[in-house]
Image (cartoon, grey):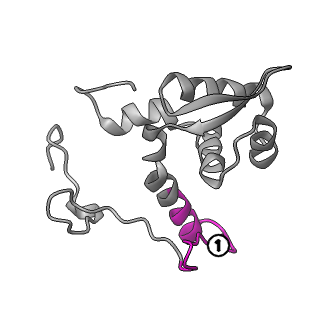
Amino acid sequence: MRSDQDGCPAAAALEVIGERWSLLALRELFYGVHRFDRIVERTGAPRNILATRLRHLEAEGVIERRRYQEAPARYEYHLTEAGKTLLPVVLALMAWGNEHLVREPKLMHHTCGSGLRAVTVCADCGEEAHAEDVSAPWVRRA
């Protein structure tokens, strides 16, 4: 995975996953869609652009290709361990879209039938973080 220890972690992450077709492909992988044609169908992505995005995600260690057919060679795409940790990011985007952008929210359900809520908590104390709680050591507040 790319490392940007001196820069903004959000900017570094966006270099890897911050493009529309990349995020939609990741959404499909979380839904359990692994084959290229189905990802194209479900995202509406142009085939050539999606292929480029998937190669980039693979090169960055977010996804991996697995051969499922020998002749002709055909592959499925699967999340790596690093890719699986993007679930909260994708869920947060979906939750924000549900709340602010879509007329009829597409609910996200856990196996128990309840909706999912993306929450950010402090790694040490477990307290939920809010927008006004966020700070970065390299940014001075005005």
Find the magenta span and give its range: 93-114
Left or right of 15: which side holds 30? Answer: right
Q: How many residues crowd around disc 1 within 10 Å: few (fewer than 14), some, or many (20 or more)? A: few
The percent coordinates of residue 91 (x first, y second) are 51, 59
Give the residue number, with chain letter if any, for mark 1: 105
Is 27 in the magenta?
no
Residue positioned 26% across, 68% down in the render: 128
Q: Nearer the viewer, residue 117 or 69?
A: 69
Q: Position of residue 68 (x, y in %)?
A: 74, 31
Foreground residue among 32 and 2: 32
Residue 74 vs residue 136, the one in the foreground: 74
When asked about the image quadrant of residue 121, the answer is bottom left
Quarter residue 22 falls in? top right
Residue visible at 42% across and 47% down in the picture: 85
Image height check: is 92 above or below 18? below
Q: Write the residue at 53% across / 79% down.
A: 114
Tell me residue 71's x, y (percent).
85, 20
In the figure, is residue 63 to the left or right of 103?
A: left
Residue shown at 53% from the left, 76% from the top: 115
Give amino acid for label 1: Pro
Residue 48 rendering spot, x and y as whole percentages: 76, 25
